[in-house]
Image (spheres, grey):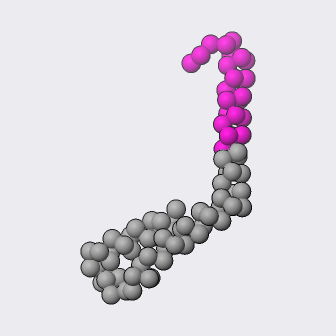
Amino acid sequence: MYLLILALLLLGLKLAGVEPVAHWSWWWVLSPFALAALWWLWSDLSGRTTRMAMKADEQRKAERLAEAKKRLQSGGTKG
């Protein structure tokens, strides 16, 4: 995500003509887009994205379970 933000910032600076980015080669300005694409490719191929999604699902499940236990102990009323 940080690479994408950097890429958009550099692109905006290049198009706006802000120094010193205005004089940089387009290769330097656009390279963070390529790096972000490589990062996402690696993240998907390595299973990192899936592991993070599973971890978030487990966290939501644990929170729902804790909330259900809390409601049962307080007499089952909501709110």
Q: Please state the horizontal and vertical placement of residue 40, each as a whole percent of the image.
A: 59, 63
- Residue 69 figure quarter: top right
**23 relative position to 74: left or right:** left
Name the residue rendered at 71%, 40% in the picture.
Answer: 58
Image quadrant of residue 19? bottom left
Q: Does the magenta segment cover residue 65?
A: yes
Q: In this view of the protein, which residue sits in the foreground, 65 or 74? A: 65
Asked whether residue 78 is drawn in magenta, I would say yes
Residue 65, horizontal then vertical, whole percent: 72, 28
Q: Label the magenta part by its dominant secondary structure.
A: helix
Return the residue nearer the eye: 51 or 78: 51
Tell me, yes or no, if residue 20 can be seen here.
no
Taking 71 as reference, is 44 above or below it? below
What residue span does the magenta drawing correspond to?
A: 56-79
Q: How many marks?
A: 0
Give the residue displayed 71% in from the left and 51% down from the top.
51
Residue 5 in view of the camera: yes
Q: Quadrant of the C terminus?
A: top right
Residue 23 vertical placement versus 68 (above, below)? below
Residue 75 in the image, given as x and y percentages of width and height: 69, 12
Direction left: furthest residue: 16
Instruction: Please state which of residues 58 and 66 is positioned toward the viewer in this rendering.
Output: 58
Q: Quadrant of residue 15?
A: bottom left
| Residue 20 left/right relative to 73 | left
Give x and y (percent) for residue 12.
33, 71
Apparent side of residue 40 relative to residue 59 in the rendered image (left or right): left
Q: Is residue 16 above or below residue 20?
A: above
Taking the spot 72% from the left edge, 61% from the top edge, the residue there is 46
Q: Is residue 31 left or right of residue 65?
A: left
